[in-house]
Amino acid sequence: MSKNKVNVPEARAALDKFKMEAASEVGVNLKQGYNGDLTSKQAGSVGGQMVKKMVESYENSIKNNG
């Protein structure tokens, strides 16, 4: 069972989609549900890509609104 709690339950699908997109971009094959067979390097690559995309999105919003 996942320990991650989503404060807005409707956001779960969007977060899962975002994670799958990030994994695809770094060449990691995620499956729905448990992915405990990933290496630390693979999991870190997915998380790092997600952060990179979030930072880029934030920077673009500042440029467009500033």
Image (cartoon, rainbow, N blue to C red):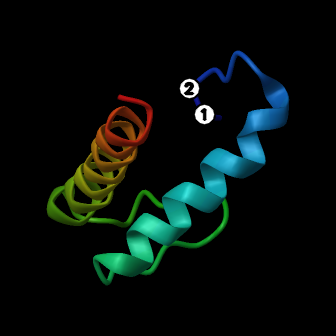
At x 15%, y 62%, the residue is 41
Instruction: Tell me where residue 22 appears, x and y as whole percent.
Output: 41, 66
- Residue situated furthest right in the rendering: 10
Q: Nearer the viewer, mark 2 or mark 1?
A: 2
- Residue situated furthest top in the rendering: 7
**Are discs 2 and 1 less than 8 Å apart at CB?**
yes
Mark 1 — residue? 2
Left or right: residue 28 versus residue 18 is: left
Quadrant showing the N terminus: top right
Mark 2 — residue? 4
Badge 2 density bin: few <14, some 14–19, many ≥20, Cα 10 Å? few
Describe the element under mark 2 as helix, strand or loop: loop
Q: Is residue 18 above or below residue 31?
A: above
Badge 1 density bin: few <14, some 14–19, many ≥20, Cα 10 Å? few
Left or right: residue 18 versus residue 22 is: right
Instruction: Tell me where residue 31 appears, x and y as whole percent.
Output: 59, 72
At x 21%, y 53%, the residue is 44
* Front-most of residues 58 and 48: 58
Quadrant showing the C terminus: top left
Q: Amino acid at mark 2?
A: Asn
Q: Is residue 6 above or below residue 57?
A: above
At x 82%, y 27%, the residue is 9
Image quarter for residue 10?
top right
Instruction: Tell me where residue 18 appears, x and y as whole percent.
Output: 55, 57
Left or right: residue 5 versus residue 20 is: right
Q: Is residue 50 above or below residue 61?
A: below
Q: Is residue 34 visible?
A: no
Q: Is residue 38 visible?
A: yes
Q: Amino acid at mark 1?
A: Ser
Describe the element under mark 1 as helix, strand or loop: loop
Instruction: Tell me where residue 6 appears, x and y as whole percent.
Output: 67, 23
